[in-house]
Image (cartoon, helix red, strand yellow):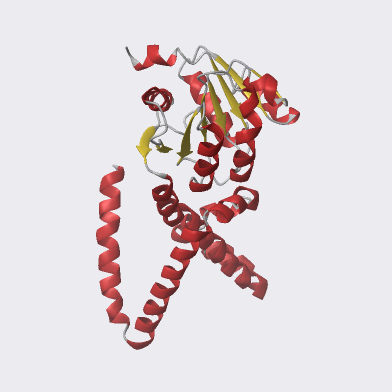
Amino acid sequence: MSEESEFTGFKKITIIGCGLIGGSIGLALKKNSYSGEITGIDRKEVIEKAIYSGAIDWGTEEIEKGVKNASMVILATPVQEIIRLLSKIKPFLPEYCLITDTGSTKKEIIKEAWKVYSDKYDFIGGHPMAGLEKGGIEYADPYLFSGKPYITVVGRENTNLAGLKMSTFLNFINAMEIRLNASEHDRIIALVSHVPQLIAVIMTNLFGSLVQEGYDEKCLKIGGNAFNEMTRVASSPFSMWKDIYQTNSKWTINYINDLEDMLGQVKEKIAKNPHKLEEDFKKASYYKEKMSQKTE
């Protein structure tokens, strides 16, 4: 059976949270000629925008109405809201419904999901590595996931069919599935996403301190590509990040400690013998080259 014909088994997909990620999922489904029904659950004003953009067919503020007869439910809200929704939607889920999420941390979500659904439903954790520094349905993009990594957490409790359905869904929106366990996910993502976000905020605030000293016009003109690239995500709203740091504090703090140690070593080399930094630059060049090869 082909992946396309297998996907026809999804008669209705319900997306709870029709912002950037939820809206982009809906648009990606439509772009790839999904023939089923796409329902959105969100606030009235968001639903209206999502319908207008073509991301969903119809929407509601009521969970019971929205998940009725759904083949798949996607929780595309902030992390703590995902955790709250897991038990809230359960009484209304139809039999054999696949539930997944798009949260940026996984351990706390998976822990709650397996507790809530272990007796009846399949929950597979998901995290698309394709966000933007802006949020909201206004920025939804049907190509947001094309060729981008989409991490899934498939557990021993999940049926083979559930894993197949999830893979089929991701292939349909042209995402590249990468399977990790929840701990692996949170450790890796803390390094490649959560700590870099903090660094972008810190560097931008350092820039701000110069502006406050009266260097505003000069700074704004001088800021180069490297600085702009490093701080691109600094404008991300805190509402997108507060739950992330609350539910993945362990690994975020771990890497902040490592960063402090490495900055201390670099500081000492600059003070005593800057030539010793060459080893750090060579090592970074080697790993950056390996990263570039993997992403080509």
Given the current orientation, which residue lies at the most extreme bottom position?
272
x then y, percent, for residue 271: 38, 86
Name which quarter of the figure residue 154 lies in: top left
Name which quarter of the figure residue 171 lies in: top left
x then y, percent, for residue 60: 71, 23
Q: As rendered, which of 2 and 288 lies closer to the eye? A: 2
Name which quarter of the figure residue 158 lies in: top left
Q: As rendered, which of 19 and 155 lies closer to the eye? A: 155
Residue found at x 56% / y 47%: 133
x then y, percent, for residue 3: 36, 17
Asked whether residue 138 is in view, the answer is no
Determine whether 12 is above or below 258 in the image.
Answer: above
Q: As rendered, which of 88 and 173 lies closer to the eye? A: 88
Asked whether residue 127 is in view, the answer is yes
Residue found at x 36% / y 38%: 178
Q: Quadrant of the C terminus?
A: top left
